Image: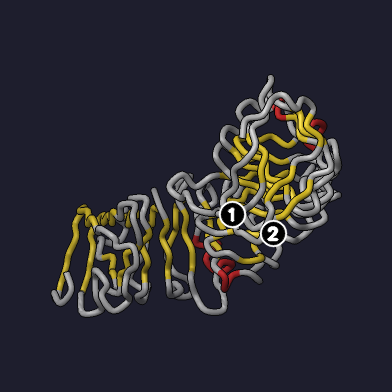
């Protein structure tokens, strides 16, 4: 499309195949393009990388008629163009839609984000808090946070199902005010750290849900590192997601911790020797439990979690002092998301309850 002067779309779809590492100087729709759409325009970016659009896109639908701009596909669509002409309803059905410039003040825009999808501003100085009012309150997807957003405060009280997704590895020091005191976190190819204290308020127990981004398989996890001793509503880690607890009360002082199928739980704080047996529900089905420095005294009863492996990260040296109970007559040891580094000893398990059973 580069070099063409005009593109008009009327209820049509552009399928843009991304590259693993796009160049800002070679976008699919360049600034020389004059792009308009009428009634509807869909941009489909399949999974596999990022696509950038530098052409301003203008909605020319008749006044009063319904119109929609739709982002489909599990890939990432980056808008790096003025947004004044992009009006009406915007639907993020799949993947990530990122704007590199802000919508004008008072823009006639409503962004609908489906579950599993995400919308973000990637702007110097941050911008998540100014994007939030443009998002439809019934959205079930996520608002994305880049490194520039780490100081932003987000008031989500009008958004009962909107998650906060960490898009870059960073410690988010802003404050989130959730709907019904329910914090919903996601991480996409990043380690998102939330250190701010979470606590019950107004008679409503605080609770946390960690959701998985299915199309992202690299090192993505949510870390709770604050003193959440005032939280009693528990923690839910949905199927396939990964949670890191880096404070003795990161999971609150009470409340059930539910680990879905194929989840990973990382412990790097003195959560208490009986944490896994007293706080984690019996119907939990984690695939991996990692012990790191600070959690050496935790007792691990693998009999409660069929098929679960006990291990640590490859860049760790952990001498467990707690006990390890096998599943049946087998200990499942090993695992970890990072390769072993020669200067580290990994996990040295504590007291094995039945030394005749060993499956490494």
Residue drawn 28% across the image and 69% down it: 58
Q: In this figure, which residue is indicated by the disc labeled 1?
A: 340
> Residue 308, how many percent across, how many down?
63, 32
Q: How crowded is mark 1: few (under 14 residues within 10 Å), some or many (20 or more)?
A: some
Q: Which of marks 1 and 2 is in front?
A: 1
Q: Residues within 10 Å of mark 2 (few under 14, many from 20)?
A: many
Of pointers 1 and 2, the one earlier in the residue sequence: 2
> Residue 304, how many percent across, how many down?
71, 25
> Residue 355, how many percent across, how many down?
75, 27
Q: What element carries label 1?
A: loop
Is residue 229 among the parts visible in the rendering? yes
Residue drawn 85% across the image and 49% down it: 229
Which residue is more in the foreground, 197 or 246? 246
Q: Horizontally, is 61 left or right of 229 in the view?
A: left
Quadrant the C terminus occupies: top right
Which residue is more in the foreground, 106 or 92? 92
Q: Do the residues labelled 1 and 2 touch (CB within 8 Å)?
A: no
* Rendered position, 183 above or below 54: above
Residue drawn 33% across the image and 50% down it: 73
Q: What element carries label 2?
A: strand
Is residue 179 among the parts visible in the rendering? no
Residue 351: name its quadrant.
top right
On residue 63, the disc is none
Which residue is more in the foreground, 157 or 355? 355
Q: Horizontally, is 256 left or right of 151 in the view?
A: right
* Rendered position, 253 above or below 106: above
**Colour convention:** secondary structure
> Residue 149, how many percent across, how many down?
59, 70
How far apart in space, not on screen, are marks 1 and 2 (Cα)?
A: 27 Å
Q: Residue furthest top?
A: 328
Q: Horizontally, is 358 left or right of 136 in the view?
A: right
Q: In this figure, which residue is indicated by the disc labeled 2?
A: 194
């Amino acid at each position: 499309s580069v070099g063409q002067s005009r593109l008009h779309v009327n209820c049509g779809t552009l399928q843009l195949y991304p590259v693993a590492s796009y160049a800002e100087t070679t976008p699919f729709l360049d600034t020389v393009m004059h792009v308009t759409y009428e009634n509807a325009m869909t941009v489909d970016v399949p999974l596999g990388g990022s696509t950038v659009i530098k052409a301003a896109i203008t909605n020319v639908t008749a006044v009063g008629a319904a119109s929609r701009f739709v982002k489909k596909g599990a890939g990432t669509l980056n808008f790096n163009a003025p947004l004044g002409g992009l009006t009406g309803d915007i639907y993020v059905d799949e993947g990530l839609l990122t704007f590199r410039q802000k919508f004008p003040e008072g823009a006639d825009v409503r962004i609908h984000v489906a579950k599993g999808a995400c919308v973000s501003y990637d702007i110097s100085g941050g911008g998540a808090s100014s994007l939030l009012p443009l998002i439809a309150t019934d959205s079930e997807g996520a608002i994305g946070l880049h490194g520039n957003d780490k100081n932003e405060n987000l008031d989500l009280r009008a958004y009962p199902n909107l998650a906060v997704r960490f898009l870059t590895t960073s410690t988010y020091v802003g404050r989130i005010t959730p709907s019904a005191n329910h914090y919903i976190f996601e991480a996409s190819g990043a380690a998102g750290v939330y250190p701010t204290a979470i606590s019950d308020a107004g008679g409503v127990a605080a609770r946390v849900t960690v959701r998985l981004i299915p199309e992202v398989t690299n090192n993505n996890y949510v870390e709770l590192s604050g003193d959440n001793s005032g939280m009693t509503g528990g923690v839910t880690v949905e199927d396939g997601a990964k949670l890191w607890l880096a404070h003795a009360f990161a999971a609150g002082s009470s409340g059930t911790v539910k680990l879905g199928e194929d989840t990973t739980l990382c412990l790097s704080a003195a959560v208490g020797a009986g944490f896994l047996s007293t706080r984690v529900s019996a119907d939990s089905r984690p695939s991996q439990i990692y012990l790191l420095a600070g959690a050496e005294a935790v007792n691990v009863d693998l009999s409660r979690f069929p098929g679960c492996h006990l291990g640590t990260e490859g860049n760790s040296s952990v001498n467990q002092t707690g006990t390890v109970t096998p599943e049946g007559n087998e200990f499942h040891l090993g695992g970890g998301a990072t390769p072993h580094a020669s200067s580290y000893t990994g996990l040295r398990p504590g007291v094995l309850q039945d030394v005749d059973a060993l499956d490494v």
